[in-house]
Image: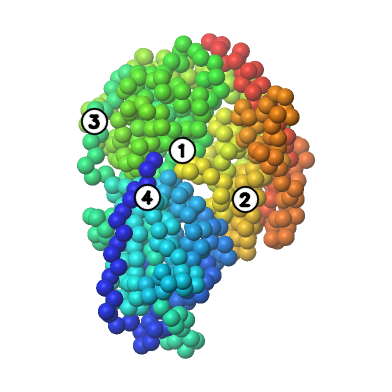
């Protein structure tokens, strides 16, 4: 998916008097005007990183915290941005991150990339040197306005002479345009970068902070035309239609078809409408729904779902031939077997995305894109088409999938009993042990694939979050902390390298505000590489451990304890349930499950081989 590029906003002309009586007070007052305008537009959360150049923004955030701004602080800009990413995914609203100038801005890039490809609203605000200090060797002065340009929906810049040189109306307009651009009709939600020069003196003194004029913030959200036409997304259960979209011919509801539901990337305020539309469609058509583990659909009782498609499609079956009609919801699931099956399907394919007009078809199937979202698309169909019931052909296809799904899940219950069976067994057991509706965040690489293939579809339903836009492991723990802060509680399932990669995320424990249980699969390195054809014969031809697995001699329980987070090691499958009960009662806790990545890779292959006799029974 190519990022959506927006032209850089021109710097406003500078010959305007500062807002305050002197520059330090002017910087503070200008920052207050900016942040208050963002709050009036709906911004509720801000993550602040330390810095001198951003001092006025920090002071303003501290003042506005008393007006209802949810303010968090972080010493690591990368962790801060990923925390905001998790918060934004769970709330459906942009979260602001404030940094100082220089390389601090570069640390925002990994989260900006994920926000771009994952369609997550995010507002990144950086302080900068004024133009007079650019290109002359001034300390901490870099071309930071270019750092995030390839990923952001829009780049807004303050006056080159300093934010305090801008008039109040210009600052308010800049804030309004930036916030609206994070969720603009016609493009996917995503990150926006505000780069704001500040000239010295930077910091207001105590008397100025006590007497400063605080702009009003408790007014309805603004609805204004920001950058290029209206960019306000209504907070309704049905997303707004994307301008100039042509849905093309609709499916034949009286013929057989299959629905493939990939990872959900819509806004949470649109979920109920999406689910209701899918339930209505299945009742009318009878089409089976192949539901990815990140689709949010598993455990929904109103739907007839297939969760074990990854293992079922290991064994070609004439009854499960790719259909002539295929409705695809969102990005393609991770299963390579399902991807091959989709690529063999007929030409009548529709790919429905939740407000993302970008290409989401790496399989090159020439499918009809529907970027308006499922609920809006189905609402546009003529009412008479909903009269009727599933055809005989559709019922036969659904029955074939349902028979094999029941056989597979029954077999897996015996093959992976009670949390045994290594990492696949852990994925299956967790779904049953975790309380219903408890949000789950799953790290990339092996954990998300095991959840897709071996997770129990009979387990209680819950929100499941995976960050597969760019599929990195950069900020796994911080993302989970953001989700927990937004929803009040969450569980993170992660591997050891992903957790180590974001160890600064443990610092959130002191200001989390919610509960987070971290379940660590410690298999001594990159377990995903064991599932790829990398190891050589003879083994001494390649140093696999050093070049790919890269095990690290870190005691994760001790590392968590150093941050004030208690932890325990799970001693076998029977120990998982009591340890989980303990962990869920803690504000933040770590459970370590030690596994053997090489043995688990062999176990996954064995499960696929052994499953075939039960799957092919009529």
Q: Are marks 3 and 4 in contact (CB under 8 Å)?
A: no
468 vs 5: above or below: above
Along the polypeptide, which appears first: circle 3 or circle 4?
Answer: 4
Residue furthest out toward the right: 571
* x then y, percent, for residue 25: 41, 84
Q: Quadrant of residue 419?
A: top right
Mark 2 in CB contact with mark 1 (< 8 angstroms):
no
Q: Which mark is residue 501?
A: 2
Residue 189 is marked as 4
Residue identified by numbered label 1: 263
Q: Mark 4 or 1 closer to N-term?
A: 4
Residue in the picture at 57% in, 54% down: 478
Label drawn at residue 248? 3
| Sequence-first disc among 3 and 1 | 3
Query: Residue placed at 40% from the left, 70% from the top?
Result: 134
Q: Pick whichever of labels 2 and 4 is earlier in the sequence.
A: 4
Image spot of residue 603 (x, y percent): 68, 26
């Amino acid at each position: 998916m190519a990022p959506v590029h927006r032209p850089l906003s021109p710097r406003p002309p500078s010959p305007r008097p500062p807002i305050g009586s002197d520059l330090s007070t002017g910087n503070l007052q200008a920052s207050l005007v900016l942040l208050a305008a963002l709050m009036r537009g709906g911004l509720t959360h801000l993550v602040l990183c330390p810095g001198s150049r951003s001092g006025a923004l920090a002071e303003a955030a501290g003042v506005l915290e008393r007006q209802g701004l949810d303010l968090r602080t972080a010493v690591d800009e990368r962790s801060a941005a990923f925390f905001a990413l998790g918060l934004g995914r769970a709330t459906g609203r942009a979260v602001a991150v404030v940094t100082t100038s220089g390389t601090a801005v570069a640390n925002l890039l990994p989260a900006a990339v994920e926000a771009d490809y994952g369609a997550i609203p995010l507002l990144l605000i950086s302080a900068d040197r004024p133009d007079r200090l650019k290109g002359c060797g001034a300390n901490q002065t870099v071309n930071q306005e270019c750092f995030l340009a390839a990923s952001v929906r829009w780049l807004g810049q303050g006056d080159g002479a300093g934010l305090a040189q801008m008039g109040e109306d210009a600052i308010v307009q800049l804030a309004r345009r930036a916030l609206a651009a994070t969720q603009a009709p016609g493009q996917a939600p995503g990150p926006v970068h505000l780069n704001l020069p500040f000239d010295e003196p930077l910091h207001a003194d105590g008397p100025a902070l006590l007497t400063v004029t605080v702009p009003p913030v408790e007014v309805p959200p603004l609805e204004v035309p920001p950058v290029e036409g209206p960019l306000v997304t209504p907070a309704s259960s049905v997303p707004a239609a994307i301008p100039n979209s042509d849905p093309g011919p609709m499916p034949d509801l009286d013929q057989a078809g299959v629905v493939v539901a990939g990872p959900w990337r819509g806004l949470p305020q649109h979920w109920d409408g999406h689910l209701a539309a899918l339930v209505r469609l299945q009742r009318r058509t009878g089409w089976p729904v192949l539901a990815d583990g990140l689709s949010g659909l598993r455990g929904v009782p109103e739907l007839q779902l297939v969760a074990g498609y990854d293992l079922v499609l290991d064994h070609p079956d004439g009854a499960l031939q790719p259909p002539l009609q295929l409705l695809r919801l969102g990005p393609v699931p991770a299963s390579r077997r399902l991807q091959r099956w989709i690529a063999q399907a007929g030409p009548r394919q529709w790919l429905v995305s939740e407000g993302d007009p970008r290409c989401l078809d790496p399989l090159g199937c020439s499918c009809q894109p529907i970027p308006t979202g499922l609920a809006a698309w189905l609402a546009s169909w003529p009412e008479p088409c909903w009269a009727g019931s599933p055809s005989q052909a559709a019922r036969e296809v659904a029955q074939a999938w349902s028979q094999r799904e029941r056989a597979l899940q029954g077999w897996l219950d015996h093959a992976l009993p009670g949390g045994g069976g290594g990492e696949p067994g852990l994925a299956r057991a967790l779904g049953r042990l975790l309380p219903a509706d408890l949000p789950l965040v799953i790290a990339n690489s092996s954990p998300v694939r095991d959840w897709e293939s071996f997770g129990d579809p009979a387990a209680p339903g819950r929100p499941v979050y995976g960050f597969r836009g760019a599929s990195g492991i950069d900020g796994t723990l911080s993302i989970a902390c953001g989700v927990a802060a937004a929803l009040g509680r969450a569980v993170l399932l992660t591997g050891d390298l992903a957790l180590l990669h974001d160890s600064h995320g443990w610092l959130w424990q002191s200001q989390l505000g919610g509960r987070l249980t971290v379940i660590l699969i410690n298999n001594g390195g990159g377990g995903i590489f064991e599932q790829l054809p990398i190891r050589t014969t003879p083994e001494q031809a390649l140093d696999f451990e050093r070049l790919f697995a890269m095990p690290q001699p870190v005691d994760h329980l001790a590392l968590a304890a150093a941050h004030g987070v208690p932890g325990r090691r799970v001693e076998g499958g029977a120990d998982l349930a009591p340890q989980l009960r303990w962990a869920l009662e803690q504000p933040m806790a770590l459970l370590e499950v030690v596994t053997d990545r090489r043995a688990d890779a062999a176990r996954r292959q064995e499960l696929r081989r052994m499953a075939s006799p039960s799957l092919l029974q009529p």
